Image (cartoon, grey):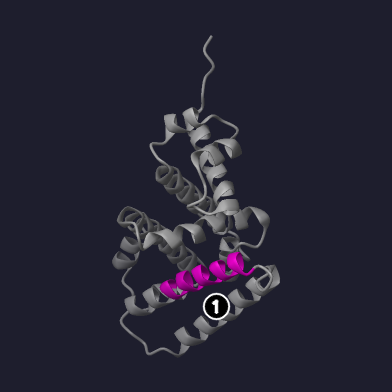
């Protein structure tokens, strides 16, 4: 009887292997052979599931975001959760997250010179920003009353800050250990809270427009 192959699991295995390979070598230096070796499969098996190395990188990046989303969703619903406790799940504060984040940093270095990767980056950027919108609304219910400008300012600030902190932690790990990352995140969120409290009141963020953003 033919062996039943779980295609989704095999694709995920290859995508995770790509994360590990890129974390070690960078995107440019990583080959299909490197990915196959990490995945424990042949290069022929890889080409059965992916048309090119860029397709694998795209799948790996999406997998990382899906894992981040799962961590956020696992915390949303907890009574004692704060924006800090949710967002810290996005940082490279342990080995698994360091591998996940390393592929992002390597990927960013390629975006400006490749129109196709630029489009992939735009898509994934919107995906990530929507995750943070959900986290903000869940932990700061008053966000539903903010103006659209204030809401977008806060969520964009969070995304930009986390991207910058992640890049610093991956490229300068000796300066940005877990404690330093968490301290920086806590300080940034406190500054955001102070800013939003002191900002000029604007028309309420309508339920319809908020729900449209959160789709």
Secondary structure found at label 1: helix
Q: Nearer the viewer, residue 60 or 146?
A: 60
Q: Residue at x 45, y 90 (%)?
A: 198
Say whether residue 169 is magenta. yes
Chief SS of the magenta region: helix
The residue carrying mark 1 is 189
Q: Position of residue 203 (x, y in %)?
A: 30, 81
Q: How many marks?
A: 1
Q: Residue at x 59, y 74 (%)?
A: 185
Q: Quadrant of residue 150?
A: bottom left
Q: Residues within 10 Å of mark 1 (few under 14, many from 20)?
A: some
Q: Position of residue 68 (x, y in %)?
A: 53, 55
The reply, left or right, for residue 180 in relation to residue 104 is right
Task: Report the magenta residues as a range.
Answer: 155-172
Quadrant where the C terminus sits is bottom left
Q: Nearer the viewer, residue 205 or 48?
A: 48
Q: Position of residue 129 (x, y in %)?
A: 42, 64
Q: Residue furthest top?
A: 1
Q: Position of residue 177 (x, y in %)?
A: 68, 69
- Relative height, residue 45 to residue 73 (above, below): above
- Relative height, residue 144 to residue 75 (above, below): below
Say whether residue 208 is magenta. no
Q: Quadrant of residue 87?
A: bottom right
């Amino acid at each position: 009887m033919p062996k039943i192959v779980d295609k989704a699991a095999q694709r995920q295995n290859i995508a995770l292997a790509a994360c590990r390979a890129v974390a070690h070598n960078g995107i440019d230096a990583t080959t299909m052979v490197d990915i196959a070796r990490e995945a424990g499969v042949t290069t022929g098996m890889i080409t059965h599931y992916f048309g090119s190395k860029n397709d694998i990188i795209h799948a790996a990046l999406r997998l990382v975001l899906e894992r981040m989303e799962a961590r956020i969703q696992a915390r949303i619903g907890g009574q004692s959760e704060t924006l800090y406790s949710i967002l810290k799940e996005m940082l490279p504060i342990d080995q698994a997250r360091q591998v996940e984040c390393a592929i992002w940093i390597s990927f960013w270095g390629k975006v400006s010179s490749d129109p196709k990767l630029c489009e992939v980056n735009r898509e994934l950027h919107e995906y990530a920003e929507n995750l943070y919108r959900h986290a903000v609304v869940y932990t700061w219910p008053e966000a539903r009353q903010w103006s659209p400008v204030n809401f977008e300012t806060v969520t964009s600030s969070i995304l930009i800050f986390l991207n910058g902190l992640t890049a610093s932690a991956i490229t300068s790990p000796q300066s940005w250990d877990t404690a330093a990352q968490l301290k920086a995140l806590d300080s940034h969120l406190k500054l955001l809270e102070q800013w939003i409290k002191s900002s000029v009141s604007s028309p309420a963020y309508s339920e319809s427009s908020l729900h449209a953003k959160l789709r």
